[in-house]
Image (cartoon, rainbow, N blue to C red):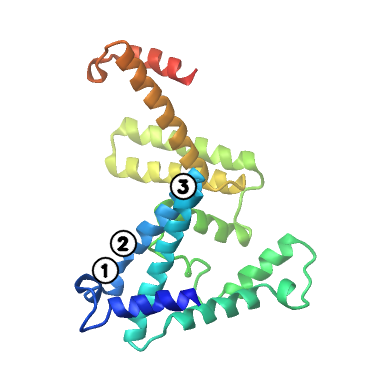
Amino acid sequence: MKIDKLVKIMEKLRDPNNGCPWDKKQTMESIIPHTIEEAYEVAEQIYNKNYNELKEELGDLLFQVVYLSQIASEKNKFNFNDVVESITSKMISRHPHVFKNKKFKNMKEFKSWWEKSKKKKQLSILDNIPFTYPAYLEANKIQKKVASVGFDYKNKLDAIDKISEELEELKIEIKAQNQRKIKEELGDLIFATLDVSRKLKLDPEIILKKANNKFSKRWRKLESLVKKDNLNLNKLSLKNYDLLWNKAKK
């Protein structure tokens, strides 16, 4: 199998005598940033719908899994085959409606069963949320967990009202110039905004990425208008910025 060839390449790269000097000295901890970077590069090509590049980036991400598995194997913890066996068994056990004869009445019942199947012994329903998640993703996971046990808004408009409430509290602290409270209330406002995306069943990463792209396109258009009119970005007044921005939006 081709995957076996990749595993053998990794073993050779890590060979104590004849391996690559850089690869030989890597640890699990030193590989973490590279693994995270590769995951982001995969996401970039998915957003760009660049399937040639996506194929390459998926290979790079797979290599990170093989890399970490090789280091674990050297520590006599597990190897790549164990990783494959583990995920295979997990997916079969988590999908009894596909691989066995279990029936679910609807998607809600399946999701409830799915959450229960993932639960390990824990003191809190939040215990299995990794602290290494990006803050926006951690917030989304926290909100989903507490909502699953009934701690949720009655409807979407209530979630939006919470944003208004947090916004007013932020205004109060800005007027009071209380820096500690400003940070706290701004955090609450962002958290409440993310909660609206959950309530609307929208992925905050995807909708924020689209907002970033929309803003970036308009800004580049504004820059082209500035260049066309022989203006200087650093010397534009807010009024001029507003005029150019409105042109860029059109």
- Asked whether, in this view, residue 17 is left or right of residue 227, the answer is left
| Disc on res. 33 | 2
Location of residue 226 in the rendering, given as x and y in whole percent from the top left corner: 32, 16
* Helix, strand or loop at mark 1: helix
Q: Residue placed at 40% from the left, 22% from the top?
A: 221
Work out how far the residue at label 3 is from the one at label 1, CA to CA, in angstroms.
31 Å
Q: Residue placed at 67% from the left, 64% from the top?
A: 111
Can I make out residue 238 in this image? no
Question: Callout 2, which amino acid?
Answer: Pro
Seen from the viewer's position, the closer of residues 42 and 136 is 42
Label 1, residues with CA under 10 Å away: few <14, some 14-19, many ≥20: few
Q: Is residue 192 above or below residue 241?
A: below
Q: Which residue is mark 3?
A: 191
Give the mark toward the camera: 3 or 1: 1
Q: Are marks 2 and 1 in contact (CB under 8 Å)?
A: yes
Can I make out residue 34 in this image? yes
Work out how far the residue at label 2 is from the one at label 1, CA to CA, in angstroms.
7 Å
Question: Callout 3, which amino acid?
Answer: Phe
Label 2, residues with CA under 10 Å away: few <14, some 14-19, many ≥20: few
Give the mark toward the camera: 3 or 2: 2
Question: Callout 1, which amino acid?
Answer: Ser
| Disc on res. 238 | none
Location of residue 16 in the rendering, given as x and y in whole percent from the top left corner: 22, 83
Location of residue 13 in the rendering, given as x and y in whole percent from the top left corner: 29, 76
Q: Are marks 3 and 2 in contact (CB under 8 Å)?
A: no
Sequence-wise, the earlier of marks 3 and 2 is 2
Seen from the viewer's position, the closer of residues 178 and 108 is 108
Q: Which residue is mark 1?
A: 30
Work out how far the residue at label 3 is from the one at label 2, CA to CA, in angstroms.
26 Å
* Helix, strand or loop at mark 3: helix
